[in-house]
Image: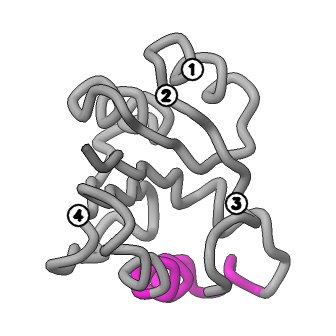
Amino acid sequence: MQETLVVDAANTIGSVPDGWWRDRAGAVTRLRDALAALADEYAAIVLVVEGAARDVPGTPAVRVVSAPASGDDAVVAAVAAAGPPCTVVTSDRELRARVTALGAAVRGPRTLPRW
């Protein structure tokens, strides 16, 4: 059984100081497209977005979940819905604790393909 990959978009794009703050939706779109290259490695890829990137659409390879409020809460909900095995990409310590309590593994943003 392949695992689900859940990506905290805001935390991930925020880990690279490349001017993403000038175009958050564009940065998330680039991340979404880079994640598509991993589609064969996972049962599903879920990208959780919030704020100015909330309208970025999903693709056949990457499901985009728009957080209605807290992005962290939406990541936790995605992990709970996916069940194990699941890996979350974030460097947020509090979020790491919440998802590992649900049985998810955690990796840092720099483990993803460059976007």
Q: Is residue 42 above or below residue 93?
A: below
**On the rendered structure, is 36 left or right of 27?**
left
Mark 1 residue type: Thr
**On the rendered structure, is 26 left or right of 16?**
left
**CB contact under 8 Å: marks 2 and 1:** yes
Q: Between marks 4 and 3, how big is the CA–CA gap?
A: 18 Å
SS assignment at label 4: strand
SS assignment at label 3: helix
Q: Residue beneath label 1, please?
A: 100
Q: Residue beneath label 2, please?
A: 104
Q: Position of residue 81 (x, y in %)?
A: 21, 29
Q: Residue at x 62, y 80 (%)?
A: 113
Mark 3 residue type: Pro
> Which quadrant of the figure has residue 38?
bottom left
Q: How busy is the neighbourhood of tag 1: few (under 14 within 10 Å), some, or many (20 plus)?
A: some
Asked if residue 43 is among those painted magenta in the image, a careful observer would answer no
Mark 1 or 4, nearer chain start: 4
Q: Is residue 8 above or below residue 85?
A: below
Q: Position of residue 16 (x, y in %)?
A: 80, 74
Q: Between marks 3 and 1, how big is the CA–CA gap?
A: 16 Å
Mark 3 vs mark 2: give the one in front.
Answer: 2
Mark 2 residue type: Ala
